[in-house]
Image (cartoon, rainbow, N blue to C red):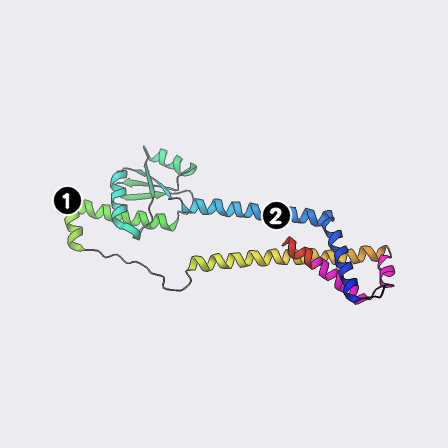
Amino acid sequence: MSYTSSNTIRTVAAREISVAVRNKGIIFSLIITLILAIGGIGVASYFNTREDAAPALAVVGISTEEFRQVQDALGENVEKLSVADATGRDAAEAAVKEDIDAALIKTDEGYELLSDGQPKSSIQATVAAVTSTLTQNEALDKLGINPQEFGEAMGAANVKTMDISEDPVEEQMGAIVTVMLGMMLMTFFIMLFAGNIGGRITEEKSSRVVEIILASVRPLDFLAGKLIGNTIVGLVAT
């Protein structure tokens, strides 16, 4: 049978694929990568779900119904908060340390916003807008002016921000993160299977298998078969 480069490359590539799929190191690395990828997706989904949920706010000295009415009247200018009553300052502090994002307490000097760490900017913005409206309504009541009639007479002064770019920031960030993750995975697999090629050559050279093989095939055909075989395994694994 005459020697052909294509047959040699095909034979070496098939041999490399057969060896790679039985390599415990490669299989273990693929399993770990798969677990990390699934775990990463789960963690990202968990935090996205948490971000989608309305932030929770406990209130003391303020009617939750009144807070919700003012919040709804402000419309899309503020983020909607999930409001609940707290019996007092101690209860509000305990709730903040457990599962409530923040607590709003009405005092003689004004209002206090309690949080375990720095509160979210969206919570601060909503609380500032609502408390400003509540304070204004109280002042109007003292002057004998109906807050609803005053609001209708004043008219709307809402400023709505519109993103007119073709690709919204959220979509751009999602695309960037996806590309970065893809590049990281590709880099990992390139390093894994490039190292596998070097390891296989070292292993075969130490057992003098390479010398026997190179005595019957061309070195370039042998190397091409190795590269093609490991590339196929790497692409399939990726």
Q: Give the x, y percent position of residue 63.
A: 26, 38
Label of residue 231 in the image? none
Looking at the rendered structure, the kind of residue marked 2 is Leu
Q: Nearer the viewer, residue 48 or 110?
A: 48
Picture layout, residue 196 above or below residue 127: below
Magenta-highlighted stretch: main secondary structure? helix
Q: Is residue 1 left or right of residue 79?
A: right
Picture layout, residue 145 above or below residue 64: below
Judge the density around disc 2: few (<14), some (14-19), many (≥20) Cα neighbours within 10 Å.
few
The quadrant of the picture occupied by the C terminus is bottom right
Looking at the rendered structure, the kind of residue marked 1 is Lys
Q: Nearer the viewer, residue 110 or 8?
A: 8
Q: Which residue is label 1 attached to? A: 142
Q: Which residue is label 2 attached to? A: 34
The quadrant of the picture occupied by the N terminus is bottom right
Q: Are marks 1 and 2 in contact (CB under 8 Å)?
A: no
Extreme residue in the left direction: 144
Task: Name the residue: 43% across, 57% down.
Answer: 170
Report the Cα–Cα distance between label 1 and label 2. 66 Å
Extreme residue in the front direction: 1
Q: Give the x, y percent position of residue 76.
A: 30, 52
